[in-house]
Image: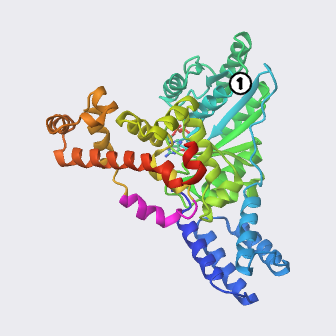
Amino acid sequence: MAFESLSDKLQNVFKNLRSKGKLTESDVKTALKEVKMALLEADVSFKVVKQFIKSVQERAVGADVMNGLNPGQMVIKIVNEELVSLMGSEMKEIALKPGNEITVIMMVGLQGAGKTTTTAKLAAKLKSKGRVPLLAACDVYRPAAIQQLQINGEKVGVEVFSMGDKQKPVNIAKAAIEHAKSHNMNVVFLDTAGRLHVDEDMMNELIEIKEAVQVDQTLLVVDAMTGQDAVNVSQMFNDKIGIDGVVLTKLDGDTRGGAALSIKATCGKPILYAGMGEKLSDLEQFYPERMASRILGMGDVMTLIEKAQANLDEAKAKEMEQKLKKASFGFDDYLESMNQMKNMGGISSVLSMMPGIGGSKMKDIEGMIDESALARTEAIILSMTPKERANPDILNPSRKKRIAAGAGVDISEVNRLVKQFEQSRKMMKQLPGMMGGKMGKRGKF
Ligand code: GDP
């Protein structure tokens, strides 16, 4: 996960601060020196770090300690606020035209940054919000680019407009917009060609497209793993063609994260989205506040709640609640819960957003999570007949033996799972009583 090492270091600095009752100016100075080192090591640009530390220092020295906060907490509060402001303060949306007016979004970036993938991810997001997008294949140089866009478009159910690789990108862009007009579509993504490095030809081609068609938004896709390069690339693109926002990809990887902290401060343009994986659903809106929270190990409960809501089927949740109340849930429900967790990105992803579980703690936990055990549990449940899943009481030794053989596990694993399951049912039965008083009588918990 990105920011792991930065997060660890900052948390250590703050732990030391917290353990002191009263802070002297030199305590603050030492702490800020360590914050500075941590940021530099995370590949945040030197100029940005200098300005950042200056702002924190000025505020920390002049700050009145607020009610209920000790001086250490006050410093943490200031660092948090400055981190948020560094990343642009507020979440910014892509500016879309109202109603059925067409918004043309030009996607630009270097080869391999994740432009084609991100274009499909964004189109899927806008589609889910009721927009009708069209993907225009304007990268006529990279051999597989058109095909890749077509595959991705198909996966997210968005039409792809292509004229092969013999036409000029600017003509494809014009024709795509006409196509969108005549087919009642309201967002056109231009997937333009990238190069390995910023070069004249690429920039000129982008300028040509911008002059020939009305581009409403130019979004730059940069790879967070490239650190300072991502920052330089953003600056160059902004200077040459003008960009409206940045999508930072591969923040799920082991990046040091400096790019996320430097881009807004360096080129003045906000990060709109963060790519969090290769799957076409792995795109998160970029909230500076939530990102700062994750960096400081305070978790990101808001994103967690939103993910849960996006994956939650209200009717199913109600049904589950009823089953839990009556302790009448079966193995199918168990499987369903496992799938929900998977849809939210797996246990590790969910845990990493919990307060206090960032950084290296996550590594320890990841070591303890045995993903293959989960797969075996799934295999065991899938080897049961529907009747057995709904009514686990009928699981006698011969059925268990058959299930173990079906799942390719030892019978002791089946026994263990069934026992665990029975215990949770027992607990659920006792729960209303344990809550005692009126709650229990009303059957609410
Ligand atoms: P393009 O050359 O800029 O169009 O880049 P592609 O869209 O082909 O992406 C290059 C590679 O990066 C592909 O293997 C993608 O699956 C991968 N990729 C894109 N975005 C992300 C992301 O957010 N996280 C991860 N881990 N991989 C990504």
Residue 365 within the segment the image draws in magenta: yes
Secondary structure state at the residue bearing disc 1: strand
Q: Is residue 392 above or below residue 256?
A: above
Nearer to the camera, 3 or 115: 3
Q: In which quarter of the image is residue 291?
A: bottom right
Image point (62%, 65%), residue name: 296
Nearer to the camera, 383 or 122: 383
Q: What residue type is labelled 1?
A: Val
The magenta stretch spans which residues? 355-368
Q: How crowded is mark 1: few (under 14 residues within 10 Å), some or many (20 or more)?
A: many
Nearer to the camera, 378 or 36: 378
Q: Position of residue 407 (x, y in %)?
A: 22, 37
Label 1 within 8 A of ligand 1 by Cβ:
no
Q: Quadrant of residue 58?
A: bottom right
Q: Where is residue 281 in the image (x, y as percent from the top left)?
A: 54, 36
The residue sitting at the top extreme is 182
Residue 42 within the segment the image draws in magenta: no
Nearer to the camera, 264 or 275: 275
Q: Is residue 175 above or below residue 147?
A: above
Q: Is residue 205 visible?
A: no
Q: Where is residue 426 in the image (x, y as percent from the top left)?
A: 37, 48
Q: Where is residue 21 in the image (x, y as percent from the top left)?
A: 69, 87
Image point (37%, 55%), residue name: 369
Image point (50%, 25%), residue name: 155
Q: Main secondary structure of the magenta part?
A: helix
Image point (85%, 79%), residue name: 62
Q: In this view, does 101 lie above or below 314?
A: above
Residue beneath label 1, please? 187
Is residue 82 rendered to the left or right of residue 286? right
